[in-house]
Amino acid sequence: MRIRIIVILLIISMKLISLNISGRIVNVDGKSIGNVVITVNNKAVISREDGNFRLADVFAEDKINFHKISYKDKTISAGDIKEIIILEEDIISIQGLRVIEQRKRELIGTSEIIVIKTGNSSGSAADVLRDYTDLQISGTQLTGEEQKIIFPGYKARHTLVMLDGIPLNKSGTAFDISTIPAEIIESIEVVKGSSSSIGGAGSMGGIININTKRANNKYMANASHAFGSFGLDKHSLTVSAANSKIQIYAFIRKSYARNDFEYIPAEDPETLRTRDFNDKSIYDANISLGYSGSIGMLSYKLLFQDFFKKLPGNTESLEWFKNSRLTGQSQKHVINYSRKLEDYRIKTDLFYSLDKSLYDNTRLDSPWSENIFLATLARNRQLSRGIKLHLEYLSDAFYVDWGGDYRYEDFKYTDLNYPDQSIEKVYRNNYAVFGKTHLKQKYFPYTTSLTGSARWDNTKNFKDHTSWKVEPEFSYENYFKIYLGGNVANGYTLPSYYSLFWKGDTHVSGNLDLKPESSLSWQIFSKLELLDNSFKVTYRHDDIDDMIIWIRDELQKWKPMNLSVAEIDNWDFELNLKFLRSLELGAIYTKSSAINRSKDDPNYGNNIIYVPDYSLDIDMRITSGNFVGDLSYKLLGEQWTNSYQATTEHLLPAYDLLNTRIEYSISWDKFEFTPTIRVNNILNKLYEIYDHIPQPGINWEVNLGIEWKL
């Protein structure tokens, strides 16, 4: 009898200390994952379509396993279960990049997408892309400096930058990607190749899609302070909270830098001068709110920036822009809604973007202060808003995405000193319908896929344009994997407001007769994978018609014209090696040729300016426990700075850079302290990326971050 009582009491006590667990399963983007198999001991449950699940009568030490095809298995002790469980897609790691293979892409459905996982990076989107891709980034590599992405052979205006699938570029203009803080970025998708059928105008060279972070932990707070060369001083704070339905993520940062680096003046190469009047002060703020429930998923994002930037100009005309400055604000609002109905998903995106700035160049010395075209005080205002509606259907072998979008833009330039130079408000409407289909079939060990996309655009004051893209792919899998594929596509880019409407003076003016630039592009690739190692070769050919360039007309006035025809060829060779688990090595070599094929141009057959003839990127990463070390080397070939190329006078020399980053994480209880040291241009090379635009020598940054999670 006594033994029975003891056994009963033991069972009751065990029942009392058992746990009832509930939570929600999401992917890294915060989207719910249904039909996940959850097992513990001999019990199993399946998560609902909204990702929610419940487990009864488990103990703190029990191991709970989460399993779903196309996602990594995850095992967690019951006592460590949080309200939000994050499953990562099945991935292949290469050179710090992760190429995600899954049935559907937000932008496109092939293995040609490179996805960069940012982790806890600091700085800007430009720093992330510089570290992990072979893309050329124009602009000085310092805080607050304008930086733009260039695909080989193209101009910066031919790169479409998107935020969670929403275009950020104003029509015909390049986007300053340094304005997006790295701290708010979850991942960056890089699509190489003409993609107007996906993103519309402005993506002739490719697409950069930035995916922002969402709250994943119940509570999280991160504070960091960074300091470094040339007066760099940054403070940032991130807080987030989440439960099964609500997610809140907020980020603020204050940045200041003098950017007073030394350079070699062209007129006296035996001396060094300081880049004065180059101060930058920036405030960034980001808020992200999300709700998941029976009505679907609803989210709102705000990106805000207030800036003060001095703009010293190039070193040949320092007196023309002495102590000039640009002040202003930028705000971007994005609302996303989606709801899944069996195999269908309805998605709606709304966006609103407003940029306002004041350019002040009224502090000039005599006689430049009397020049009405230099002593400028002017306001610039640009607005963009729109909506995108689309419907997705997804099965094991078939994916369809079709819908439409509307976009409105306006532009106004007000010269406060000389009102006659002002440009009254002009606007542009764009209506578009699009469709994308992805078909994939597996006949082990073979897999074939075909992706087709098309888009029709109607834009005010321009002819309708139909963009298309076709992408076949074949793969074979045994002890190794072989991929063969390619694509053919067309693209276009609209003229910018400045090119069309600029009033200028007796020497410069816009051109209302400009036509959109257009291109025809095709590429093929072959890739071999063996374990965690890979080698890939890609060839890409582009023909660009009606490229917009500035020339002197018969009255000797500078004016943009549709004159240039360009032929571009690129060879890419990519090698990724992984030694054991701690050492990764990646290398990308690109050979480029960009030739002027305008028959009536006296420079026919010459190289397109500022296209390096080759580039080499090598990155080595060492990971050991809480230590991460990166060493990267970049070599950029010669570039022509002028269309007249009879002599080497206008040939910009090749240059190479060696950079390193060291990071170490120290964990204690629920805190994690992560000091990071970055040193750029270790070899202290003094070089130029554009003629008379010098770059800094060796420079460093130390970031001290502490994070708390619950």
Image: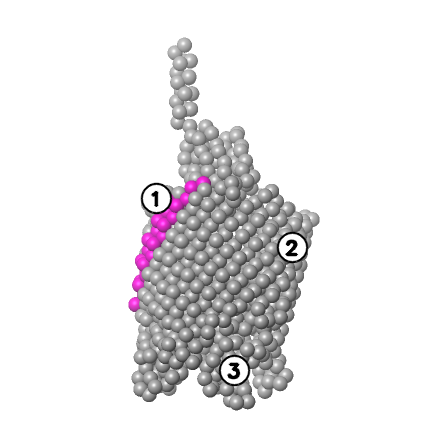
Look at the image and tell me whether residue 596 can be seen. no
Question: How far apart in space, not on screen, are marks 3 and 1 (Cα)?
Answer: 61 Å
Packing grade of label 2 (10 A; few <14, some 14-19, many >=20) is some
Q: Of discs 1 and 2, which sits in the foreground?
A: 2
Screen quadrant of the C terminus: top left
Question: How far apart in space, not on screen, are marks 3 and 2 (Cα)?
Answer: 42 Å
Q: Is residue 350 left or right of residue 18?
A: right
Q: Position of residue 690 (x, y in %)?
A: 45, 77
Residue furthest to the top: 1
Q: Secondary structure at mark 3?
A: strand
Q: Is residue 288 magenta?
A: no
Residue furthest to the right: 443
**Which of the numbered marks, if any, corresponds to residue 559?**
3
Q: Secondary structure at mark 2?
A: strand
Q: Earlier in the sequence, mark 3 or mark 2?
A: 2
**Which residue matches tag 2?**
437
Q: Position of residue 217 (x, y in %)?
A: 41, 45
Q: Secondary structure at mark 1?
A: loop
**Which residue matches tag 1?**
670
**Which of the numbered marks, if any, corresponds to residue 68?**
none
Question: How far apart in space, not on screen, are marks 1 and 2 (Cα)?
Answer: 46 Å
Q: Earlier in the sequence, mark 3 or mark 1?
A: 3
- Quarter holding residue 546: bottom right
**Residue in the foreground of this view, choosing between 182 and 648:** 182
Residue visible at 46% across and 87% down? Answer: 506
Look at the image and tell me whether residue 488 can be seen. yes
Check disc 2 and give the amino acid type: Thr
Residue visible at 33% across and 43% down? Answer: 669
Packing grade of label 3 (10 A; few <14, some 14-19, many >=20) is many
Magenta span covers which residues? 219-244
Check disc 3 and give the amino acid type: Lys
From what the image shows, is residue 680 above or below residue 292?
below
